[in-house]
Amino acid sequence: MDDDAQYALAAQQGDSKAFGILYDRYIDKIYRFVYYKTFVKEITEDITSDVFSKAYQKINSYNADKGTFSAWIYRIARNAVIDHYRTQKKTVPIEDAFDLGEEDRTAETHDALLTLGRVKEFMSSMTPRQREIITLRIWEEKSYREIAEIIGGSEDSAKMAFSRAMRDLREKCGPLALLFLTIFLAPHALPFKDFS
Amino acid sequence: MDEKRIQHAVREITDLDPSLKPHEAELRVFITNMADVRPHVPLDQHFVTSLRARLMLAPRPQVSPFMNLSAWAFRLAPLGAVALLLLMIAPPYYQTGQYEFPDPTADPRILEINVGSEVTQTARDARQSELMRYGMGGDTMIATEAESSMDFKGADADTAVDAYMGDGGGMNPYMPPTDDQGNAGGETDIAQMSVVPVEESGAENSLSSEPSRFLTVSPQKAGGIIIIDSVTAEVPGFIVIYENSETTYYVGTSGLVGPGTIRDVSIVLERPAPAGAIYYVRFYADNGDASLHTGNDTIERDLYGMVRGTPLLIE
């Protein structure tokens, strides 16, 4: 039984301090995970609060024999994001909960918004699953094992999905697109980082 | 994403899909640029601490005693129960040829303790005695008060309870005791009322999950003053603010309050309370000297002798 599972077991026994330790370990990760799907601070805070409230209230439903605590709480987070978009954007397919939040970036510079638009253009050419895997791999630097735990499936299937996404991106956009990406994105990388 | 990780990611992709090997340079560029345009995550530390505090104050999820039993344990549990029963029955049966259950009307353990100078206590069962060992005799705030099972010489159980709540039996430390003729006598020493001193019972610092029954508190703004919504106590006492769940160091106290209900009690803290903190509010019954001394005054406890405290969220 790993460390997280032991704390989860203690929390199931009524030890709220143990849950506090798990909270400290995962608040940053879950917040990032949700933020990369919503790109709006207030919505991210609402969803993150909802995730940890549910995790605390339903801690007894976690079973260490069936998976890691990390996978369990990430599943709660994914479902919370989907529920949010289900209530907010009923006309959008549920799996397409992808929004770089351009409408909330009116204060950004023109170049930054243009860069954001370009990234969205490339990302929108992928399937939701490919987009999620790329985000988890590149932005959140998750291992394939962790990706598999979060989105379901095996580690090998996560690797295959990532490599396929790279191939599809190259095939759809062509080799020059990647070159354009280099020329266009590189000078704008720094301003793009300050979204808050 | 550092260079080493990018190289590793590219190598993994080309190992999985050799057709991408000729395009390794492009892949490296794409992954590098994707990593470079990763948005900054605006994680607010105030949000983190506030959420944590709210979660810790939330009611704990109910613990099922069966949650951690495996499926096999569930299936085997009835068999185990039957086996245990057979083990209990078999030896007496083989000894006597028939089994006799223990006599449930056998005399319980009787314990006589002198409480004060005029009262004797008779414990009717082991449970009552155990409560007394913790210095708690019933659902009252003073650790040494009597239960309804207490026998007073020449009095019934109702009188025994009234004696602690009023001035008839002389056990209220704030009223002078009276003799059989109703004449006032000397003060009763609270310390003599304990069967086992609380310090010896080991319960003196055990913390209860139950809040105070006398205090009503609301979340407070960060700062140097705490306002207690109300305190309702039957005896005078003090409200004490602790900066954590332990009872080692307090950061603010009220003046003498009660008996009765008092609202909006302001307490100045030694240092400002930071946002996101959880303080604990406790009530001490005054020992009669109108001065707070946590070693002499009686802290509010639950039925098991554990210290009650109400968590207070600082927003």
Image: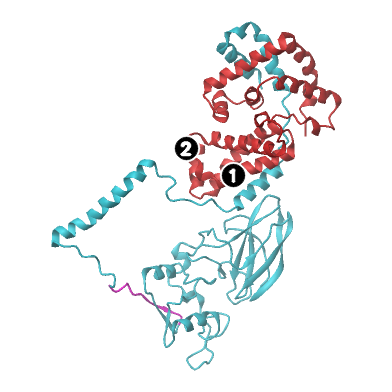
Chain colours: A red, B cyan
Q: Quick check: is B113 in the magenta stretch?
A: yes
Q: How many marks?
A: 2
Q: Quick check: is B266 in the magenta stretch?
A: no
> Residue at the spot x=53%, y=23% of the render?
A155
Q: Residue B215, image x and y in percent?
A: 63, 66
Question: What's the chain of the residue with tag 1?
Answer: A
Q: Nearer the viewer, mark 1 or mark 2?
A: 1
Is B48 situated left or right of A16 in this image? right
Q: Quadrant of residue A99?
A: top right
> Residue at the spot x=29%, y=48% of the render?
B79
Mark sitting on residue A64: 2
Q: Which residues are magenta?
A: B106-116
Of B2 and A41, which appears nearest the observer? A41
Label 1 secondary element: helix
The local crowd at label 1, few if under 14, some if 14 to 19, many if 20 or more residues have their Cα within 10 Å, is: some
Hey, what amino acid is under mark 1?
Answer: Lys
B121 over A91 or under it: above or below: below
Q: Residue A82, image x and y in percent?
A: 65, 35
Mark sitting on residue A54: 1
Q: Quadrant of residue A40?
A: top right
Gap in angstroms between the C-alphas marked 1 and 2: 17 Å
Quadrant of the image containing the N terminus of chain B: top right
- Is residue B48 something one can see in this rendering? yes
Question: What's the chain of the residue with tag 2?
Answer: A
